[in-house]
Amino acid sequence: MTWRSLRGFTGAGYDKGRCLLVQAIWFAALNILFVRWWFPARWRPALLRAFGARIGRRVLIRHRVRVHWPWKLEVGDDVWIGEDAWLLNLEKITIGSDVCVSQGAMLCAGSHRRLSSTFEFDNAPIVVESGSWVAAKAVVLRGVTIGRGAVVGASAVAHRDVHPGAVVTAGTKV
C-alpha cells in the first residue's frame, strides 16, 4: 500500500502550454461565454480557434461543454459535441471527422501515478478516430485511442485502446 503525502506534490512533467495570463483569460471566456446556453453554437469553434485549437468545418459544440486547454485540442470536420461533455485535455486530445461525443461524455487525458507517494501526474494524449461515437456519459481515459468507427457505449469506460469498429458497452471488458 502507498501512503500519499499530497503536500509533496510538485506537478512535475505537466506543461500547461501557455502562460498564467492566457490560462486565466481562457477560464474567464469559458465560464462567462463558452458554456452558456445563450452563446451561439456557431461561435464556439471560433472562440476555441482564438485560443489555439485546431477546429474543422461544420463542428457543432453544444452549451455546457468544457474544454480545459483549447491549445491542446484538434477536431476534424463534421463533429458533434453534446451538452455537458468534458474534454479534460491536460495532454492533447485529437478528434477525427464525423465523430459524435454525446451528452455528459468525458475525455480525460489526465491522471496520477497510483504508486507515487506525492501523487504526481501520469497524463497521456487521447485520439478518437474518424467515424467513432463516444455515447452519453461514457468515459475515455488517458492514453487511449478509439479506433475508426468504434463505439464507446453509454456509461462505458474505455481504459485501453478500442479497435476499429468495436463496440464497448458498460459491461464489456476492454
Image: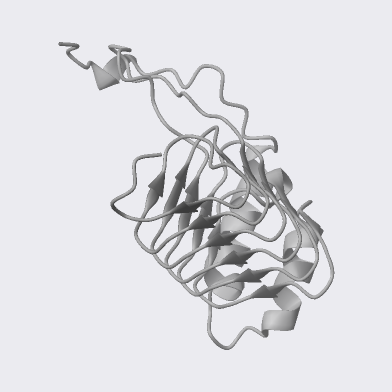
Against 173, residue 99 (above or below) is below
- Quadrant including the C terminus: top left
Residue at image point 43% right, 17% down: 10
- Judging from the image, the colouring scheme is one colour
Percent x, y of residue 105:
45, 61
Asked whether, in this view, residue 119 is left or right of residue 108, the answer is left
Asked whether, in this view, residue 70 is left or right of residue 174, the answer is right
Residue at image point 65% right, 57% down: 149
* Quadrant in the rendering for residue 20: top right
Viewer-proximal residue, 19 or 165? 165
Percent x, y of residue 3:
17, 13
Viewer-proximal residue, 116 or 162? 162
Percent x, y of residue 120:
40, 19
Count of residue discs: 0
Against 138, residue 128 (above or below) is above
Percent x, y of residue 127:
65, 43
Viewer-proximal residue, 151 or 36? 151
Query: Given the current orientation, which residue lies at the most extreme bottom position?
Result: 38
Viewer-proximal residue, 49 or 143? 143
- Quadrant including the N terminus: top left
* Quadrant in the rendering for residue 40: bottom right
Asked whether, in this view, residue 166 is left or right of residue 172, the answer is right
Asked whether, in this view, residue 75 is left or right of residue 107, the answer is right
Against 1, residue 70 (above or below) is below
* Quadrant in the rendering for residue 39: bottom right
